[in-house]
Image (cartoon, rainbow, N blue to C red):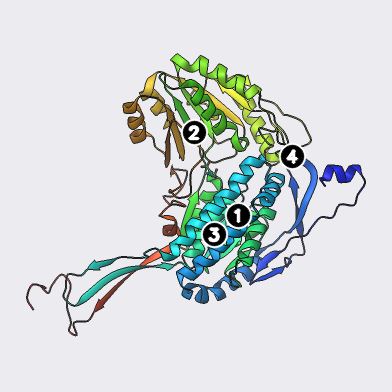
Amino acid sequence: MSQAIKEAVGAKTEVKTYRNYIGGKWVPSRTGRTFESTNPAHKAEVLGVLQQSDMRDVDAAIEAASKAFAGWRRTPAPARGEIVLKAGIILEARKEELARLMTQEMGKVLKEARGDVQEAIDMAKYAAGFGRLPHGETVPSELRHKWAMTVRVPLGVVACITPWNFPMAIPSWKILPALMGGNTIVFKPASDTPIIATKLVEILEEAGLPSGVLNLVTGSGSEVGDPLVQDPRVAGISFTGSTAAGRQIAELAGRNLKRLGLELGGKNAIVVLDDADLPLAVDGALWAAFGTTGQRCTAASRLIVDKKVEKDFTDLLQERAAKMRVGDGLQPDTDMGPVINEAALKKVHEYTEIGKKEHARLVHGGDFAGDQGWFYRPTIFADGRKDMRMAQEEIFGPSTLVMPVNGLDEALEVANSTQYGLSMSIYTNDLRKAFHAMDEMQSGLVYVNAPTIGAEIQLPFGGVKNTGNGHREAGTVALDEFTEWKTIYVDYSGRLQRAQIDTALGE
Ligand code: UN1
C-alpha cells in the first residue's frame, strides 16, 4: 500500500528503523540520533529512519574493518569471488523489489532503477571473476638462477563514499572490486539513499561476507565522511560526488598520503554535425539530457550543434521534450521523475534564472512541475555561448543548453572549453570527422553516434581534468584503485649476485 493510500484510509504507517552495520552486527548509532529518508516524488512519505552517526561510530567501524583485514587478506581470491558472485545472484533474484525501492527513495523511473540494479549485478558477476585472473607477472631477471615477479596486495581498510544518483551501481563499482582486492571496507552512502545502500550490505552479508569485512555507517558528510577520510587507519578512499567535495577530500587525504580515487563533476557535451542523422541525435540528446532527470555525472548539459542544422535540431528536441510526462517514477507512463531534494530543485531553478539573465533563449520548461514532489520540467535553453555560467557549471538536473557552432573545429573547441572532462559524444556520418573527434575530445569517455550516458561495467569509467584524479573505476583496471604492487625477487643461486654490475653471460 502506498503512503498516499494509507493516509487516505487512515491506516497507521509503520516506518522501519535501519541500523549501522559494524563488525557483523546491526547496531544503533552511539549518538542516539536519527534522520529520515523520504520519497522525492511524495515529499511527505517517509520511507525509513536511519542512524545519524558521528565519529564514534566511524571509529568502531574502522576498528572492526582493521580487525577483519588479516583474515580477509589471506582468504584466497577465488573464495572471495564466490561470495561476490553469490551477492550478484541474490541481487538478480531481488532485482524488481530493489528497483521499486530505488524509485521510491531516489526518484528515477522504474526502468532506469532496474538498469541501476542490473549494473550492480553485472559488476558482481564481472568482479567475481577477478578472483581467478592472473594477479601479477613473472618477468625475466638479468641474473641467472633468479626469479622476478609481481603480485597485487590490498591497501587495507578503505572508505567507500558514494552518491545518491546511482545508489546501487556506484557502491557496487567500489565495494566489489575493493573486496576482490582483499581490502576491508567502511561504507558511507549518501544520506538521500541510505535504505538502498543498506539493502546492498544486507545482501553481501547474506552471501557470506565475514564479520567486519564490510561496515556501513550512515550520516552526514561532516560527521561521518570527514572523520573517515582523516583517520590514519584508513589507507584508501574512493569517492564519487561533487568537484568541490572531492577537492576537500583530496586535501585531507593528501596530508596522510592516502590512496584516493575521485569521480567528480561533469559538463558533458553532445556534438551534432550538419551531416548527422538528426532524429537519431535528438533521441540521444533527449535521453542524455533528461534521463535520470539529468542527474547523472554523464548527463549531456551542452548540445553543441552546427548552425546549419541547429534550428531543426532544437525544434525537434523541443517537440519531444513537450511530450515528456513528469511524475512518480513508479507510474508506468512517467518519462521523467523528480530531482532528489529541495536543494536540487532550487539549484536547477536558479540556473534557469541565470540562463535568462545571460540571454540564453528559453525554448522549453524553466519551471516547476507540481508540488507533491521535487518536480521540474525538462528545460531547454538555446543560443548558448561558452562564456555563460550555464555552459560552464554543473547543474545536475533536467536542464540543457543548445550551443550553435560553425563546423567541427569550433565544435571541438567549445566542447573542450570547460574544467571538466567526463563524457562527450559526436553525431556524424563522416568517418574522418568521427575519428578526429575521438582524438581531440578531452574526456575520459567518448561516444560516436550514441549519447553521453550508458557506460558498461567491463570498460574503465572516469574522467580527465577536474572530473577526477586519474583513477578509473570498473573495467579490467578496477583493481588498480584498490591494490598496490609488490615486486618480489627470489635468488636461488646461493651466492651474492649484483644487479647492473655482475654480468650474467659468464657462469
Ligand atoms: C554517474 O552518473 O555517476 O554511464 C554514473 C552511465 C551510467 C553510470 C553513470 N552507466 O550513464
How packed is label 3: few (under 14 Cα within 10 Å), some, or many (20 or more)?
many
Q: Single out the mark in the foreground, 2 or 4.
A: 2
Q: Give how far across and how far down residue 334 sits, in percent.
A: 69, 33
Label 4 element class: loop
The number of numbered discs placed on residues in the rendered structure image is: 4
Residue closer to the observer: 281 or 401 = 281
Q: In the figure, residue 226 lies in which quadrant?
A: bottom right
Residue closer to the observer: 380 or 133 = 133
Q: CA distance from mark 2 to mark 4?
A: 26 Å
Q: Which residue corresponds to mark 3?
A: 175
Label 1 element class: helix
Label 2 element class: loop
Q: Which residue corresponds to mark 4?
A: 41
Q: Disc 2, disc 4: CB below 8 Å? A: no
How packed is label 4: few (under 14 Cα within 10 Å), some, or many (20 or more)?
many
Q: Give how far across and how far down residue 163 sits, in percent.
A: 60, 49
Residue closer to the observer: 424 or 456 = 456
Q: Quadrant of the C terminus?
A: bottom left
- The answer to whether residue 76 of the structure is visible from this angle is yes
Give the mark nearest the N terminus, 2 or 3. Answer: 3
- State yes or no: Cβ of the residue under disc 2 lies below 8 Å from any atom of ligand 1: no
- State yes or no: Cβ of the residue under disc 3 lies below 8 Å from any atom of ligand 1: no
Give the mark nearest the N terminus, 1 or 4. Answer: 4
Give the mark nearest the N terminus, 2 or 4. Answer: 4
Q: Which residue corresponds to mark 1?
A: 92
The kind of residue on which mark 1 rests is: Glu
Q: CA distance from mark 2 to mark 3?
A: 27 Å
Q: Which residue corresponds to mark 2?
A: 451
Q: Give how far across and how far down residue 308 sits, in percent.
A: 44, 14
Q: Single out the mark in the foreground, 1 or 2.
A: 1
